Amino acid sequence: MKKAKRDIFRRVNLVLLLMLIAGAAIIAQVLKIQIREGNHWEQIMRDKTRTRDVKGERGDILSEEGEILVVSLPYNQIAMDPLADGLLQDKDYFWDNIDGLCKKLSQHFGDKSPQEYKNLILTSRKKESRNRNIILDEAATTREVKEMETWPIFERGQFKGGFIVRKYQKRIYPYGELAKRTLGCVREDLPSVGIEAAYDNWLNPEVLPISQINTAGNNWIDVEVLQEYPEDGHNIHTTLNLELQTIVHEALYKSLDQFQASHGCVVVLEVETGKVKAMVNLTKDGKNGYSEKYNYAVGTCTPPGSTFKPAVALALLEDNKASLNTFVNVEGGKYKFYDVLMRDDHPPAEDEMTLQRCIEHSSNVGIAKLANDAYPGKDGARQLTKSLEYMMLNRMTGIKIPGEGQPYFTRLGDPNWSGVTVPFTTIGYEVLLTPLQLTSFYNAIANDGKLMKPYLVDKVKRDNKVVLQNEPFFVKQIANLSNVKQIQKALRGVVIRGTAKGIRSDKITMAGKTGTALISKPKAKDKKYQSSFIGYFPAEKPKYTVAVIISEPQGQYYGSKVSAPVFKEIAEKCYVREYDWQQAVNEAPALAKRATSQAPPTKGGDKQDLKTIYQYLEHPFQDETISDWANVTSNGKNVKFEKRPIFDRMAEGLVPNVLGMGLRDALYELENKGFKVRHKGAGKIIQQSIPAGEEVKPGTVIEIELG
Amino acid sequence: MDSILSKLKGDKAIWIVVAILAMISIVAVYTSTKALAFKYTGGSTEIFALRHAFYLIIGFGLMYIAHLTDYNYYSKIAQIVLIACIPILILTGIFGRDGRWIDFPFINLSFQPSELAKVALIMYLARMITLKQKTIKSFKDGFFPIFGPVFLICLLIFPSDLSTATLIFITSLIMMFIGRVHFKHILSLITLTIVTATITISVLFSLPDETLQTARLLTWKHRLIQYAEDWTTHYADMDVSKQTTQARIAIATGYPTGLGPGKSRQKNFLPEAYADYIYSIIIEEYGFFGVFGILFLYLFFLYRSILIFERSAGTFGALLAISLAISIVTQAMMNMMVNVGLLPVTGVTLPLVSRGGTSIVMTCIAIGVILSVDHYSSLKKGRKKKTKALPAKPITKRTNPFKLGKI
């Protein structure tokens, strides 16, 4: 036995040797692959493998009420490869159909005649001018592509017909210029701006890489299959109110156009919350009028001019240096601080004015003298800065879009500090603030001293689930309530009997402050001004704070003449919009009936809703359908609810037919039935992923395509 | 720590080798299941790694139990299990998934009986070789009783899983060699196999592909063609869509020190990188450390097993330990040779490292048995020494609770 075991032991060692040889062979082979063939394999890896990104859709940006302000839409670049394999092999087919294709191209695009298209294609086929990529359309819709697929030659697809479709996503602003700069954009060559930039990470869709290899014949094929599609980006729900934004945009545009100003901006804040309800920035754009080019409201720091006076007045009140009734000698509107002359824009009526009147009539000398006496010397200067800083005037608002300007104060110890810094600070020079920062301060005044952080995004949602909810953020109480009330009183006075009495309205009460700041050098020949009006309405119970800043107006430049009327227009239009500010005017339906002798035009919709409206108007109607959805036909007098040919009453749990509906109606119909809806495109629904009448579980996702 | 170590019996070096392999395995599986994770769980790789770790923990538990059980028990257990395996293999071949797997649907586990049969067969062979030592050179009393069961098991496995059958066959040949079966018989067997294989291959290439498709034969034909092509075509003309090419890219990219943990690119291109091609991925991520490290661990494991063989008391124990060790290392070597392109593509996994529940559990049990041999033979030796030193005490008369009597 011992002998046998020794023999076995010898053999076992032989096996170990065998394994060592195998190991050596493995190492040799690895070294061969790595060193001798290494470059080759790395080359293969670079040339023959790659990853392809599969992206979801970038999220939408929506208004406060859910209107889509920015959306990604699929577009297609259409190109033709006249040298596609199929077209070279099947020459007869090509020559038989080329005329038909060119006719279609000419009909569709209308820019060239069929002959010109034919020439283009035939030259591209020639050896000396080979062009395998004739771009026919940069942005064709899916619908157009479907149509093109039926054209001669193109019907054969890419390899046989040379019909190349390259899909891409394009950001679309359905409301054109409205808030375009605030909504922003993502750019590759320049820094990205606006909400698009600030919420880029949220908006970005999930990207899943798929590995691809290049197989024989230069075809890239996926080596893996994605079981789950990458998720779309989040939707950003802004605080912007589309209606307000439109009102403001139009009002500012009109005024800029009237005064041929270089640019202007308006900020509308909701007093209680600090929500930015509208933000308009318009820049003169040559012949095209004005367009959203730069976000002045957030980005540019300018001297606020007279609109800064209330801040100084509040500091005086807070520091117990004066009251609204403190008198000051305004020296006839001219006063020299050291060697610098200060004038009032509007010659004062009296010799002595109270602080309140100084604000109402915007007396530079009055405010400056009061403050200069109240804050004497270096200690005084220091204290004034401290008081202004207490009101957070030296702080950025922290609004979450990139590029906010940094507020500036000339401080004691700065190289350009001088003896006249204090008096000139009080009238809004030696200070630089952005319109938004100033609006935020006025908003705090309107809000009884409570400073709210302005914000643009209300919530972030994905699949109807709120992922991030921004709440109003109370920063601090900037001053005593009683003092704030005093400033409110003065601002109200500005509109009642002061510089802005021109905008008094019998519809709505307003309060605010005019401002006219010289933004060019004081001695320049061509003086440039910035007219502003910042205020709030209704004065008793402020709802919105609005700042109107217009730069370089021609002809007129006083804030009271240029900017205040814009403010008034906005306020009055808001008054019409906000029903709860008004007394009910049409409580009796008879009024409405008298007003419209004709039946109001209706397209159709939920029958129950239609009934309610017509019953309220006491207008007779005939109901001729049993369906929940009705088409309305009306010749002005007789109203008929007719069956919409494609909408039938559907049993519970069955997919309804939504073809031809608008998005709103379709969402209502489908989501009411418990389905989840994904939609694409705009217009009427042309396709639904699950056909009508199918029985599917509630919660199923139905995709609808609009076109 | 000391108390844990003191509870682990047998060769400590083997425990350490196994622990290192297990750790490498968890990391490698974690990084290489990315593609799989995307397909089935929407991206969470953790589930697969956790599942893998779970199998390793089960494996370690069974290994612990196995190494505390007297190895003489396995002689009996192996016979019973091997006989039980015959109907199980037949049923799996007919009803199982791919003819290889038994699925337990509710607990979401599957079991590969061929792995069990492999370990049972090796234990059985160790027993037979020990028993037949006196007549080992005879054909009827030596070769036949040893090769009979091997032939039967391989016959049952090969239709559905040629790789495992080949592995079992090769391991058995090595065992017959070290078990002193007549060299003439082994050589005739090899010759016979080569002849059969040649005939089979020529039949494979003469039959139309449609006929082959039904019985996985086409796969084998393609693998053979591919292997032949890999050797005959210049490496620059190799087709990128083939996994051998992708494995080579992985190995080449790993030069010299690898891309770093989790940085492998080729795991996306190598189908089932976590199974057969995990060695390539380890080379890609760890470079030379991966190449030498893994090789060293298996060879060192074999070396330690030889030491156990040398110091163990009886022939059965010694043979049992070395056979199991050789089967594990042979499998590892085959896998690595497939990875670097020295062998045609086979579905042999890297023991303890590749993902796969049954394989891990059975390998752990096998290592447990090796450790049991070490532990119990040292126990016996120790006892003998003690009896010599203290002859007055009647220890010898006490029955050894672990002793089964003559095997």
Image: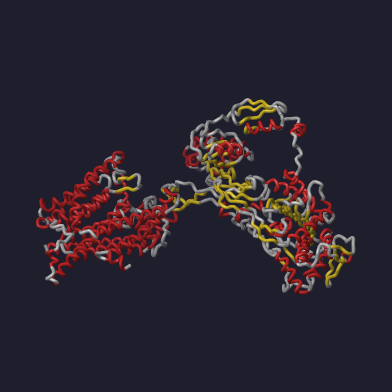
Q: How is the image coloured?
A: secondary structure
Residue B82 lies, in percent from the top left, at 20, 49
The foreground one among B73 and A144 is: B73
Q: Please identify the quarter of the rendering in which residue B310 is found.
A: bottom left
Q: Quadrant of the N terminus of chain A?
A: bottom left
Q: Residue at x 73, y 43 (%)?
A: A579
The foreground one among A596 and A246 is: A596
Picture mark count: 0
Residue B106 lies, in percent from the top left, at 35, 45
The foreground one among A604 and A218 is: A604
Q: Please identify the quarter of the rendering in which residue B14 is found.
A: bottom left
| A51 displayed left or right of B326 | right
Identify whether B311 is placed above or below B201: below
| A403 displayed left or right of A232 | right
Residue B126 lies, in percent from the top left, at 18, 56
Q: Residue at x 82, y 47 (%)?
A: A506
Residue A562 lies, in percent from the top left, at 80, 53
Q: Quadrant of the C terminus of chain A?
A: top right
The foreground one among B137 and A30 is: B137
Residue B9 visible, this orientation: yes
Residue A519 visible, this orientation: no
Q: Please identify the quarter of the rendering in which residue A197 is found.
A: bottom right
Identify whether A366 is placed above or below A623: below
| A404 displayed left or right of A323 | left
